[in-house]
Amino acid sequence: MPGTPGESGRVLHAQLHLLDRQLIDQADGHLAGKVDDVELDLDADPPVVAALITGRERITARRIVGIDTAVTVSVEDLDLDYYDDWVENHVIAKIPGARHAAE
Amino acid sequence: MRLNDLLGRRVLDAEGDVIGNVADVRLVQDGPMLVSMQRALRVDGLIVVENRHTRLFGYERHVGPELLRRLIHARLGEVWYLPWDDIEEITDEGVTIAPRRADLRPLEDLARY
Amino acid sequence: MKKVLGVTLGILTAIGGFVDIGDLVTNALVGARFGMHMAWVVVVGVIGICLYAEMCGRVVAMSGRPVFDLVRERLGPRTGLLTLVASFLVTLLTLIAEIGGVALALELASGVHYLLWMPLAAFAVWLVIWRVKFSRLEQVFGLLGLLLVVFAVALFKLGPDWGQLLHQATRPHPIGHEDWATYAYYGIALFGAAMTPYEVFFFSSGGVEEKWTRKDLVTARSNVFVGFPLGGLLSLAIMGCAAVLFLPAGIKVETLGQVALPVAVALGKLGLAIVLIGVFAATFGAALETALSCGYTIAQYRGWQWGKFVRPREASRFHVVIIVCLVLAMLTLLTAVDPVQVTEYSVVFAAVALPLTYLPILIVANDPDYVGQEKNGPVRNAVGLVYLALLTVASLAAIPLMIITKGGQ
């Protein structure tokens, strides 16, 4: 990527580098959805990227930890795994062996 | 404003003539400091293409096989970079800009980061 | 030493894993109808899959991003979704064919009707995906698939007129009462069989499953550049056997039994036993790969957690997709469709879906954001573009040719 995270003056393109990128949860490295849209605050001075949108969740820009070939975010209390958890609890967890790593 | 709403929006010059569409938003990471110890992504300007086509496949950055890049650019027509200060207003009708078509700066002139 | 062993194992796995039901059926069928007059298509197809699999392997090793992540990222949600639907349906169709192939191999070995074996086969595929470690499932079935080398042995044992086979191979045109339309149609089928899209989905996702880094580039490349061409030779041996045995007799290949027959003729019962185990392993291995690929494509497009490197419950939607696909495959086969015909159609539809899958790979393999210094050189790009053009032509011509030739009749 152009420059390391946090570096000042790095150039990115909203569509090319943010839109449709993989989101990764900083806490456990799990895949947490795709960037479906980007919210821009054009009235701010200067105008900035305000948030990333994935599914029904809004990830504010301050949670962005790094932008690389995937976007790492600090998920904290956001419920990005809602559907995965639903499927897990209603289907997958009921099948024997779901909790164990493969051998 | 949502990026997906901005992409593909018409761009009109001061005289109300359509010159193209928004293809991407150029961001520079030098905005205010965020909690995550990073700087905010400041909106620096828009990338505007002449023909209706919103996906550049990253080709504005001169990567990829030469022939494919030429094919894509041939479909896009002109590609300009529009600094944020040149934008008058953004409405549902389109993005109105101050400069005239002839005064626009081709994206090519911009440093390839 | 350990490294050499790893590389060798990888190559052997790649050879055994290269051939699937599509290659078995299409190569035998084409050999019986056109002799070796279409052998060049296998060569073209193998070069193509090597080229693009190497790009995927490199992108994964350098950036950790598998193919369908890139498809969505570069093509956007709309074109990306079209690619997803096409690739997913083709992969599902291939999964149906592979499970049918497993069941048919069991029928040939036991005499019990394949429809009785089929649910067992589908369940076994699921169980292996659910419980067996990625590297182990890849290796076991890849190595067992190597038994298909018996086709090459059989070809020698049949004692063909090598000069005549070579003569056929250097004359790329239809023979007998076959016309150019059927020739082109089967050419596309053979091309699709060699370059099936799930191979790159599986290869690149496998790179993530096995946590490839820059250090693994050697492994990735040796698998591709040594393993795949040797796998291609196996395909040619299958074609050669059919060309020697069926073409002069004017027999058309319509069943999996006929595909295996030349080995039985040349090597007797032992040969038959080996080829059946080989066919079983190859189709079972490919059933695992296609079932996983059904999950990989959808999960990667949507950004869901996927993969066997996490516990099943952590990738719950990925596992549900696989289960649903296996159930769909079972239900489709229960309608008593002929798995061999499903195979024939799956390889043609594979050719239709290919260009949109390979375009983003070519673009990203040039993007320093993803691959750093390991960008495509001018030669790779030139060949990559030639193949993209070739794939586009094949993709556009496939359906019209299918209609004109009434599916190759």
Image (cartoon, coloured by chain):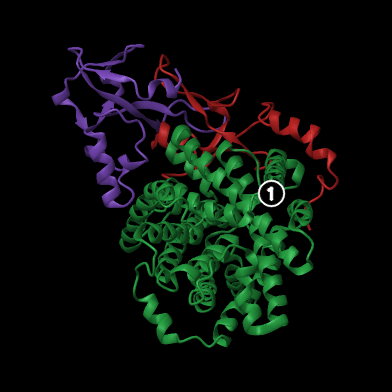
| Quadrant the C terminus of chain A occupies | bottom right
Which x, y percent locates residue A72?
57, 38
C340 in relation to B76, above or below = below
Which amino acid is tagged 1? Ala
Q: How many marks?
A: 1
Residue that appears at 27% across and 20% down: B11
Residue C271: percent from left, percent from top: 68, 80
Residue C2 in which image quadrant: bottom right
Q: Which chain is green?
A: C
Under circle 1, the secondary element is: loop
Q: Quadrant of residue A27?
A: top right
Q: Nearer the viewer, residue C243 or C394?
A: C243
The reply to whether residue C9 is visible in this rendering is: no
Which chain identifier belongs to the purple chain?
B
Q: Residue at x 32, y 58 (%)?
A: C386
C65 up-or-down from C6: above or below: above
Q: Position of residue C45 (x, y in %)?
A: 44, 63
Placement of C75 over or under C206, stated as above or below: above
Locate residue A65: give its quadrant.
top right
In percent of width and height, residue A76 lies at 68, 30
Q: Nearer the viewer, residue B108 or C207?
A: C207
C118 left or right of C229 in image: right
- Say left or right for A42 vs A65: left
- Residue at 62% from the left image edge and 33% from the top image edge: A74
Mark 1 lies on residue: C336
What chain is colored red?
A: A
* Most distant residue in the left direction: B102
Q: Chain of mark 1?
A: C
